[in-house]
Image (spheres, rainbow, N blue to C red):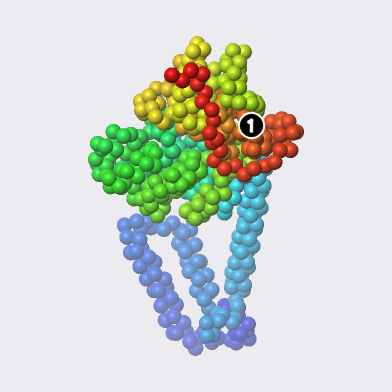
Amino acid sequence: MANDSSFLFAGIRFDRKKFGADIARFQKKDSDTDSAMILSAAEDEGEKTIEPLEEEKVAASTTKKRKRKGTSSETVEGFNVFRSSTSVAQSNDEVRVIEESVELYNNNKKEQNKQLERDAIFRKQHKIHVSGYNVPSPLQSFDELKSRYNCPSYLLRNLKELGFREPTPIQRQAIPVLLQGRECFACAPTGSGKTLAFVWPMLMKLKDPEKGSIRAVILCHTRELSVQTYRECKKLAKRKKIRIKLMTKNLLRNADFSKFPCDVLISTPLRLRLAIKRKKIDLSRVEYLVLDESDKLFEPELFKQIDSVIKACSNPSIIRSLFSATLPDFVEDRARELMHDAVRVIVGRKNMASETIKQNLVFTGSEEGKLLAIRQSFAESLNPPVLVFLQSKERAKELCSELAFDSIRVDVIHSDLSQAERENAVDNFRAGKTWVLIATDVVARGMDFKGVNCVINYDFPDSAAAYVHRIGRSGRAGRTGEAITFYTEDDIPFLRNVANLMAASGCEVPSYLMKLRKKKWKKHRPKRDSISTKPDL
Ligand SMILES: Nc1ncnc2c1ncn2[C@@H]1O[C@H](COP(=O)(O)OP(=O)(O)OP(=O)(O)O)[C@@H](O)[C@H]1O
């Protein structure tokens, strides 16, 4: 106390002689307390206690002294009213620490803002538009999957083996969003790699197989698309221990779903709904649900089926995502109702045809004119593979029998065929055995026939979405393609709609078409004359 520098004691002389005995008693107590403290600390440390080094002892005693000094100023009703020089130094230290934290915070904030600016520029370059809170930065390269998300090397090797060097815009943005555990609804042009954008995060998120529980579900609107997605998943998941299953008719009939060894299930909504109803398949542990071609799935005829699947996937931490090349407002509304804190990702302009497709309109006058036009076009230059769309299976069959006489390797696909026949038709077209595949809208969406040179809309599409998806079977993965749309008098009221889509994706459109009146596009399937030239018997 004699050495205490507090001004309160200035000028007071302490009679050390008179109080010598007391001083000795206090000093003893002080050093006793110190050794007691050291002892108890050593006991706490137990077997770990090692004799401290000399400097450590000195440091420890100074710390303690500092501590005692620090508490030496008087406390009145909880307030420290007298500040010693040490406490001033201490508060200086505190101020410095606060200043440093503020500086750090400001620097972080600046760096964050710079990153946001860089992200915005990068997104603009790739025509990526996002909305949502705290959207993660887009991927600059596939290598970032390793550096940012610790993606296993064997998965990256799979990408290299498939020849994928750079992520496409939808992959750049949707993959980080889903890896961040965010729900997502996304719209990107046909053929722009949406499948990888939802399969990849799923493969990275799903750890090794678990006993008897389905952990991911991908819903596709047709069996053909389910088969294709199943194959894509298998290719991407090569070397990964994961059980990917396709819901076939056979599986639905015979499987015991209570012991079903499956991590990822790919199905049409109808089959999965039947499995839920009849077989009590358990989807309560599904962590990842994808609705591919989501706008189609949300249409009234499929909505009931997907609704029961969504309800059965009751895991509260599920990540759901919606993907399509067309995203009407009603689907966005549904997505917002359904999802929590979702991120919206749009590449290019919503509901647009791919810019890599050269689009043409051809007036054929009548149904007869269409047959002449297609024959003439094939006679002049048939550049297979060519895909031809018609509005009904009857018409598709008729055209197929007409063209079969012309020594063209032609085949047809529609919903009257058995599954095996449909798969054959797709495989033969892919293998180049079929040059011209005549189809209904059953293969208009999602199907990835590599290198289709030309799509012919023999019958005018019945909606803007149908136009975008049909012609999108060509000009995929950055390749160029061509689309020809025949029209007759019956189709003229809806011509302007197609002209608008063409203009929006950068095609030249005759000015008179842009002056036509715009008519709201309802399901346009006029009754058309028969294609068949065979005389009625
Ligand atoms: N990063 C990539 N680099 C090169 N090719 C890719 C890449 N990602 C996907 N592809 C290829 O692009 C093609 C189209 O991909 P995908 O079928 O996923 O398109 P999509 O966007 O789903 O089209 P759609 O809207 O018609 O369903 C496929 O052949 C696929 O293998």
Q: Is residue 217 left or right of residue 150?
A: left
For the residue pair 334 and 72, the one nearer the viewer reads as 334
Residue 501 higher or lower than 136, as above or below:
above
Residue at 44 percent across and 47 percent down: it is 303
Query: What residue is shown at x 62% (from left), y 29% (from top)?
Result: 488
Q: Residue at x 44, y 77 (%)?
A: 27
User: At which x and y percent is residue 397?
Assistant: 45, 24
In this view, the residue in front, 424 or 322, is 424
Task: Report whether 214 appears left or right of 66.
Answer: left
The amino acid beneath tag 1 is Glu
The secondary structure type at the circle numbered 1 is helix
**Quadrant in which the C terminus appears:** top left
Residue at position x 59%, y 50% in the image: 131
Identify whether 535 is placed above or below 518. above
The quadrant holding residue 206 is top left
Q: Is residue 281 left or right of residue 317?
A: left
Residue at label 1? 489
